[in-house]
Image (cartoon, rainbow, N blue to C red):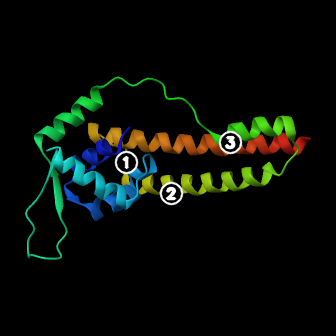
Amino acid sequence: MSLPHALLTALTEHPGSGSDLAGRFDRSIGYFWQATHQQIYRELARLEAAGWIEALPTEGGRGRKRRYRVLPAGRGELERWVAERQGVLPIRDELMVRLRAEAVVGPTDLIETLEQLAAQHRQKLATYQAIEARDFPHAPTARGQKLQHLVLKAGLTYESQRIAFCEDAIAILRAD
């Protein structure tokens, strides 16, 4: 995935300024695709230069935030990108390499790292659970909401799996 498509998605959902987008990234898309505020602002300039978004007229003069909206060409690009076939993404997980290294050079202090990771995954799982309770107190009925909930459920499943994986690895390392 690319940052331009994440921004086009966010702006298609709701027009907004760069700071609006940065805040929304921190609360939603950012859980699955991260970007710094500087990256967001740079990419907004590129999207505008490409004719995919436009800045809306500012009200009140200087110091006002530039708000953006998606143009038909940007929506077309987003539709093209969504329809593009995607292959299976390769796994690049440093923890897997650390565990393999532990198998040949251990024992090491990897348990401490695994405990910290499990705690971080528990924290993120709690965040996702709170978002689910807030945003989806009832089963969604609209297609768009169902898809948004599905993405959130993927995050819930991922965090749960990572917690279980860390706990399994800790158990194996403690058994020796």
Q: CA distance from mark 3 to mark 2?
A: 23 Å
Q: Which residue is mark 1?
A: 138
Quarter of the image for residue 161 reads: top right
Measured as percent of width and height from the top left, residue 79 is found at: 22, 32
Above or below — where is 140 with respect to 63?
Answer: above
Q: Amino acid at mark 3?
A: Leu
Q: Which residue is mark 2?
A: 127
Number of disc labels: 3
Residue at the spot x=44%, y=46% of the render?
32
| Mark-to-mark CA distance, 3 and 1 | 36 Å
Front residue of 45/167: it is: 45
Q: Which of the two residues, 56 or 140, is positioned nearer the viewer here?
A: 56
Badge 3 marks a residue whose secondary structure is helix
Is 7 located above or below residue 27 in the figure?
A: above
The amino acid sitting under disc 2 is Thr
**Residue designated by label 3:** 95
Q: Residues within 10 Å of mark 2 (few under 14, many from 20)?
A: few
Q: Is 5 situated above or below 29?
A: above
Q: Name which residue lies at 41% across and 52% down.
A: 30
